[in-house]
Amino acid sequence: MLLISSADEENSWNLYNVVDDKILDMQLRVPNRRFCGSSKGWLIFVDESFAVTLLNPFCSNVRGKKKKTNVTIIRLPPLHGKKVWIQTCDYYVFKAILSADPILDPKDCILTVINAEYGRLAFIRPTSRDKRWTYVDRKWGLIEEVVYSEGKIYAVDNNSQLFSFDINSLSKLELGQGLSSDGFSKRYLVFNSNKKQFWMVKRYIQYQKVKRETTKFKVFKMNFDEHEWIEIETLDDVAVFVGDNSSVSVAASDFPGCRSNCIYFSHDEDTCGTLEPYGPNDCGVYEITSHRFLQPYLDDSKKLLKLTRQPPIWFVPSFQL
């Protein structure tokens, strides 16, 4: 599901089902601001005080039980932000990722954020009585994405190096070598649970006067025996969704209409600029084996993207719409 903010109505977002190729006849009433995360069915944003908020617009439907309105929002303590970031607080957190749903699995729920200023990590347990941010050592920075697996945080930095962080001891282990630079790119980290593999998706971007444009993707899997990334030429039945959301891989055959061996991408934040005058235009689908871009989006969704002033974001609700 791609969330696209409404240009006509404040604090209202349209839902575009890219798999069924239709805009749903409903809108979400959520803040009209940039979301730094979409993870486990929750949207995440930062306000002017640098406080982090988790919001689940569908929480009342979880497990078929009616929930009180206040459980759809979890407010967390502020991060240590500098005053210079107040005007652009929406972008203070580069990306935010949940390890588990804070309502369904509170004991295992950890929120990790990547600071946009230096790419450093901080994490917190949203449902703990002692809500405090823990900051990872300052020398470990320039992180671009993290994923969780077996109680550890795995992270990839802007040199394509893969690390693991032990949450309890805050120790860091380098797991794989980086890659040499071959053009401006940003990185996403995906754990393919079916194959038990860590994938790094490299997105190559170029900038023009009025827009940002993705030019290609490459996908690598980590060979832990050799501690190196190996490029793969096919995703087989897998489709990957990347953007400001927690990167997600799914079996395309489980979702009729979903294109296998493809990367679905949305316009997201990077280190070289914000939204262009003509809106968040860098969205699409890329087929890995043929190295070509597909055009599956409806004309109506393209019009919505041109009118919006907020970056769209992939969203996976915790139940079937």
Image (cartoon, grey):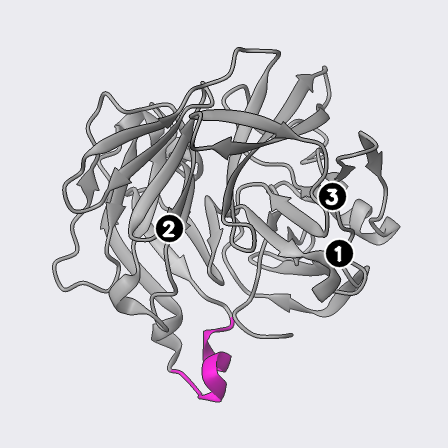
Indicate left or right for 275 with 318 as reference. right
Residue that sits furthest to the bottom in the current view: 65
279 vs 15, nearest the viewer: 15
Q: Secondary structure at mark 1?
A: loop
Name, please, the residue furthest toward the front. Answer: 225
Nearest to the observer: residue 207 or residue 226: 226
Residue to which mark 1 is pinned: 18
For marks 1 and 2, give the one nearer the viewer: 2
What is the crowding at mark 3: few (fewer than 14 residues within 10 Å), some, or many (at least 20)? Answer: many
Q: Amino acid at mark 1?
A: Val
Q: In the structure shown, which secondary structural element does the residue marked by tag 3 occupy? A: strand
Q: Which mark is residue 262?
A: 3
Q: Which residues are magenta?
A: 58-67
Q: Could you tell me the amino acid type at mark 3? A: Cys
Residue shown at 74% from the left, 67% from the top: 24
Q: Position of residue 301 (x, y in %)?
A: 79, 51
Whether residue 258 is visible, yes or no, is yes
C-alpha separation, residue under disc 3 versus residue under disc 2 = 24 Å
Question: Mark 3 against mark 1, which lies toward the viewer?
Answer: 3
Q: Where 175 falls versus 23 (above or below)?
A: above
Disc 2 target residue: 149
